[in-house]
Each structure stands twice: as structure tokens, then as C-alpha cells.
């Protein structure tokens, strides 16, 4: 007997039937990563599904993570971290802690991604481990706030830096609507490219990754050269790093350290994003951990070097009092041209992060549409309510230009717009609303609390899964200390937030609670539909586990 209502136990039954799948079942359901869409015996093609076109490689994953994680943070927040930590030495320690925390989280997610190689990230893990309600609540928060919220924040920062590059020092007096307009332009361009072609999106990502490393490497080298020669555009060399002790003034207040850690965490945020697209990896079990274990140390080291370079070049007080440390760095070394170049670099870096965020957010919305949490049109590939496979037949009838473009982007097999267009546009539209009405400090706190609640739950889920299903096939297994460290530190951070920001925490909690009735409404609707279709003798795709 199969339960129609989705209780925790039936969700578990559902998932435990699903996940041991390793071979093609008699009824024609393909391998695990493709299980989402039943295959069509007539064409052998199966439902149109992104997971059937596994295009992502190790390098794509690397540039996705690096491109998303290196965004605005390292160019903006070092000042806040130093102010809270009290000394440059202590701030470096904070950067290491934040980075290692992100790394342990990412390693834990890599284990889950290998064991459950489906698109959607925590949505599928939480459903499997704690029941579908949890997966739904994650999706609810992620789709409505976390993803479009972070998209909006990065877009705004992109806009601010680009405007700064154009108008220079007058940037403070520019009408904020100009910044917002530039932010919208950036968001819409990036969304369009990602709609056009998966390959184009990832290629843009690859390009930005190199740019970011070159930028951070450049900052480091300049810092070292300046430290040796004592050069500065104004002729006034910075001696702070020689005269001021590295640990002089270190804060002894634990809550200052916690706040400093929060500021640092934004710069490392985004480490979970490969997990949203696991289903599109050619070899997730092998490549996901490889991506994490190269990307995270690379990011940590380059952040530390950049921080040291800032301290070599800028007086401590100047670092503490700015939100745009990189621009100040450029001005100090190269004068006006330097601040222009650095503003451009930071805005490009944000654009890269925006591109990667658009890419993965679209996949999350798409997974939610497929799952029946959101209108099913969002779970479609291609423009509008396209049901047919857009490749092959349609490609032949497409215009010369679109064929040439498809070949150029490497999408000749699928044609252009073989992407979750509706989902990408949906995410962009919500982000547009945030950009227009957004209050970013509120959004950022909300982001931190809600985000870390789900990070915590997901990593806790890894531990639960180890106990409950020790024999589940895990292509990659992290040390058990990894999730434990992550859980302890994130619990500490969350408990601080409850006391420091009780109102915000309450709003987050209320928001999550609102998701519960919506869950019952969506799942009821979905099950009713499945009953109706069941009477027609047709099995809906989400009942594929039922023989
Ligand atoms: N780490 C990025 C930065 O420093 C922000 C990433 C935002 N998170 C996300 N999931 N998009 O700007």
C-alpha cells in the first residue's frame, strides 16, 4: 500500500526505493541521475530533461564555484573584518576560519552530492533524510528569498562598482536609481545568455574565473612590490605594516569575533552551488570532491594573500574605514587610473558571480518545478510550455544564424535555448523586485540566518544518513570530523544570531512556518493530479518508484 499523503515515513519509503537504484529498471526508467523523467519507449529520448545532457566537466565545476565564491566580498569586506577582529593578524585568522568552515561545508555537500547525484541540492537531500517537508521548506526559502536575494545583492554591488568606474569619485552623489538601472542591465544580460545556451553560460564562467585569479594575483604581486619598494602614487609610503604589530589591538570580545566571522562568510558564500547542478555532471562522484578540494584551498590562499597585500599598501585606519578597500588600494598605488581599473575589475568579478548565480538558481527553480512544488511550467526545458525535445527535429528548421550560433557555443546537439528558460526568467524576475525595493542590510542578515539554518540541517543530515544507511554507495566519503566541525561552528553562529538579531530570526522562523501550509497545498494538488492521471492509466513521472 502506498500512502497518498506524504508523511515523513512515506517520503522515506519513496526515497529509499529510489536511491538504491543503480540499474535500469524493467519499466524503462533510466539511471539514477536521469530518473526524474521517464523515458519514452517510442523515441528512446525520454522526457525533456537537463539531466539527460550531462555536459558539466571538472573545469566547469571549478569555474562555477570559483566564479561564484569570488565575487564582491574579498574586495569589500576586509575593512569590516579588521575592525571587528581588532588587528590584521586576528583578521587573517578570521579569514582562515571562515574559509575552513566553508571548506568543511563544501566537502560535506560533496559527499551528499556523490551519494544522491540529482539536481536541486539540499532539496533532494533533506527530502530523503528528514522527509519531504524539509526539502520543500528549503526550496521555499531558497526560491523566494535566498537565491533571488543573493542574486540581487551581487547585481547591486556590480552596479555600484561599474558606476564608480565611470564617474569616479563622484560615485557617492550618483542617484541610486542609476546604480539600480545598471544592476538590472547586468542581471538581464546574464540571464539572457544563460537562457540561450548552457555552454555559453559555463564558458563565460570559465573566462571570469581566470580573470578573478589574475586580479587577485595582481593585487598580491603589487602588494609585495609596494612593500619592498615603499612606492605609492602620492609619494606617501605606508609604514603601518612595519610599525604596527600584526596582533596589536586584537579584540578579546567573542561577539566581535562572531560578527567578524559573519562578514568573512559572505566572501566565501556560494560553496554549495555545484550541488544544485550535480545531475548535469558527467561524473559527479569523481569530479565534485575534486572541484571542492581544489577550489576551496585556492580561494582561501588567494584571499589571505589579498588581505596581506591590502595591509602592505594601505594604512590600517584607511582599511578600517572603507567598504571598497580594493578601490582605495588601486588609488594608493596608481592614483585615479588605479581606482578606475580596480572598480572595473571588481564589477567584472561581480558580473561573473552573477552569471554563476543565475546559472545555478535557474536549476534550483527548475528542480522545484519538476518536483511539483512550483507550477510545472518552471520545470520545463526551453521557452514556454515546450513539451517536445527541442533538438534534432527543430534544429533542422531553425534559422541559419541560430544553427551557426548553436555550433559555435557547442550546443549543436541540443540547439539553442535547451536550458531551463522559464526557471531562469522566474528567478531573475524575483531578483528584479528585490533590486527595485531592496533593503540590503535586512536582506543580508536574513540571508545569513536562513542560509546557515539550512546548511546546518543539510550537514546534520549527512551524519544522520551515515548512521541510518551505512551501506549507501558513497563515491566520496569525507572524514566524519568534517561535518561535525561544520555543525558545531554553524550552530554557534546561529545561536549568536538569535541573541544579536532576535527580530530577524523571528522573521526567518515565521517565513519558514508560512511555508508549511503551502507545502500541504502544493503536495495535495500534486497528489490529486496524480490520482486523476492514475485513473487514465498513465503514471505521472513522480510516481516512478511505484511498480
Ligand atoms: N561570495 C560572494 C561574494 O563575495 C557572494 C556569493 C553569494 N552567494 C550566492 N549563493 N550567490 O560576493
Image (cartoon, rainbow, N blue to C red):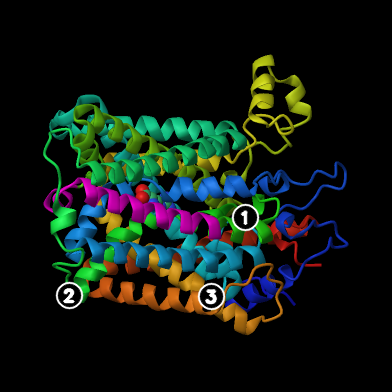
Disc on the earlier residue, 1 or 3 = 1
Q: Earlier in the sequence, mark 1 or mark 2?
A: 2
Residue located farthest toward the front when viewing the structure as drawn: 229
Q: For the magenta stretch, what is the residue range?
A: 293-322
Badge 2 crowding class, 10 Å Cα cut-off, few under 14, some 14 to 19, many 20 or more, is few
Q: Is residue 311 magenta?
A: yes
Label 2 and label 3: CA atoms lie apart by 32 Å
Q: Which mark is residue 253?
A: 2
Residue 316 falls within the magenta-colored stretch:
yes
Residue drawn where x is 52% and y is 35% of the image: 204
Question: Where does residue 5 sit, x and y in percent of width and height?
Answer: 61, 72
Q: Mark 1 packing: few (<14 Cα in 10 Å), some, or many (20+)? A: many
- Residue 461 badge: 3
Asked if labels 3 and 1 touch by Cβ distance under 8 angstroms, the answer is no
Q: Quadrant of residue 428?
A: top left
* Residue at the top extreme of this rendering: 400
Sequence order check, earlier mark of 2 and 3: 2
Mark 1 CB within 8 Å of ligand 1: no
Say above or below: 221 vs 499: above
Q: Give yes or no for contact between labels 1 and 2 (Cβ–Cβ under 8 Å).
A: no
The N terminus sits in image quarter:
bottom right
Crowdedness near tag 3: few (<14), some (14–19) or many (≥20) residues, C-alpha within 10 Å:
many
276 versus 450 height, above or below: above
The total number of labels drawn is: 3
Mark 1 = which residue?
278
Q: Is residue 306 left or right of residue 477?
A: left
| The C terminus, quarter of image | bottom right
Tell me which corner region of the image, top left, top right, bottom left or bottom right, holds residue 230.
top left
User: Helix or strand or loop: what does disc 2 sit on?
Assistant: loop
Q: Secondary structure at mark 3?
A: helix
Amino acid at each position: 500500500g502506498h500512502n497518498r499523503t506524504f508523511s515523513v515515513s512515506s517520503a522515506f519509503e519513496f526515497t529509499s526505493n529510489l536511491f538504491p537504484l543503480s540499474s535500469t529498471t524493467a519499466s524503462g526508467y533510466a539511471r539514477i541521475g536521469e530518473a526524474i523523467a521517464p523515458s519514452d519507449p517510442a523515441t528512446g529520448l525520454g522526457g525533456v530533461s537537463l539531466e539527460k545532457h550531462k555536459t558539466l566537466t571538472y573545469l566547469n565545476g571549478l569555474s562555477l564555484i570559483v566564479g561564484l565564491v569570488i565575487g564582491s566580498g574579498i574586495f569589500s569586506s576586509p575593512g569590516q573584518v579588521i575592525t571587528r577582529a581588532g588587528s590584521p593578524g586576528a583578521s587573517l585568522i578570521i579569514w582562515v576560519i571562515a574559509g575552513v568552515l566553508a571548506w568543511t561545508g563544501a566537502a560535506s555537500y560533496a559527499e551528499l552530492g556523490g551519494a544522491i547525484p540529482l539536481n536541486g541540492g539540499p532539496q533532494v537531500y533533506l527530502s530523503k533524510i528528514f522527509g519531504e517537508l524539509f526539502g520543500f521548506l528549503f526550496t521555499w526559502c531558497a526560491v523566494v528569498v535566498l537565491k533571488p536575494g543573493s542574486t540581487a545583492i551581487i547585481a547591486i554591488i556590480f552596479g555600484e562598482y561599474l558606476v564608480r568606474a565611470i564617474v569616479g569619485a563622484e560615485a557617492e552623489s550618483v542617484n541610486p536609481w542609476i546604480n539600480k538601472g545598471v544592476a538590472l542591465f547586468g542581471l538581464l544580460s546574464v540571464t539572457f545568455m544563460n537562457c540561450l545556451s548552457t555552454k555559453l553560460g559555463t564558458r563565460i564562467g570559465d573566462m571570469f574565473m581566470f580573470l578573478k585569479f589574475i586580479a587577485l594575483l595582481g593585487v598580491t604581486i603589487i602588494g609585495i612590490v609596494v612593500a619592498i619598494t615603499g612606492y605609492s602614487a602620492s609619494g606617501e609610503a605606508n609604514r603601518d605594516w612595519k610599525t604596527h604589530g600584526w596582533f596589536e589591538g586584537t579584540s578579546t570580545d567573542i561577539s566581535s569575533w562572531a560578527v567578524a566571522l559573519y562578514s568573512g562568510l559572505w566572501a566565501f558564500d556560494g560553496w554549495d552551488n555545484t550541488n544544485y547542478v550535480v545531475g548535469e555532471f558527467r561524473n559527479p562522484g569523481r569530479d565534485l570532491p575534486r572541484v571542492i578540494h581544489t577550489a576551496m584551498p585556492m580561494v582561501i590562499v588567494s584571499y589571505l594573500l589579498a588581505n596581506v597585500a591590502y595591509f602592505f599598501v594601505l594604512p590600517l585606519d584607511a582599511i578600517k574605514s572603507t567598504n571598497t578597500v580594493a578601490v582605495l588600494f588601486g588609488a594608493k598605488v596608481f592614483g585615479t587610473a588605479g581606482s578606475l581599473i580596480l572598480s572595473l575589475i571588481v564589477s567584472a568579478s561581480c558580473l561573473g558571480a552573477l552569471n554563476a548565480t543565475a546559472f545555478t538558481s535557474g536549476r534550483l527553480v527548475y528542480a522545484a518545478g519538476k518536483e511539483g512544488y512550483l507550477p510545472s511550467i518552471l520545470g520545463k526545458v526551453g521557452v514556454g510550455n515546450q513539451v517536445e525535445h527541442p533538438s534534432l527535429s527543430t534544429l533542422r528548421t531553425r534559422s541559419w544564424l541560430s544553427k551557426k550560433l548553436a555550433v559555435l557555443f557547442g550546443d549543436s546537439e541540443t540547439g539553442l535555448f535547451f536550458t531551463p528558460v522559464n526557471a531562469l526568467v522566474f528567478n531573475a524576475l524575483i531578483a528584479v523586485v528585490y533590486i527595485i525595493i531592496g533593503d540590503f542590510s535586512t536582506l543580508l542578515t536574513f540571508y545569513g540566518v536562513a542560509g546557515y539554518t539550512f546548511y546546518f540541517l543539510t550537514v546534520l543530515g549527512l551524519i544522520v544518513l551515515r548512521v541510518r544507511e551505512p551501506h549507501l554507495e558513497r563515491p566520496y566519503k569525507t572524514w566524519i570530523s568534517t561535518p561535525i566541525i561544520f555543525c558545531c561552528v554553524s550552530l554557534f553562529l546561529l545561536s549568536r544570531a538569535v541573541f544579536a538579531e532576535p527580530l530577524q530570526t523571528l522573521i526567518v522562523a515565521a517565513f519558514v512556518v508560512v511555508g508549511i501550509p503551502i507545502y500541504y497545498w502544493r503536495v495535495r494538488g500534486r497528489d490529486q493530479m496524480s490520482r486523476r492521471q492514475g485513473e487514465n492509466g498513465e503514471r505521472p513521472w513522480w510516481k516512478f518508484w511505484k511498480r
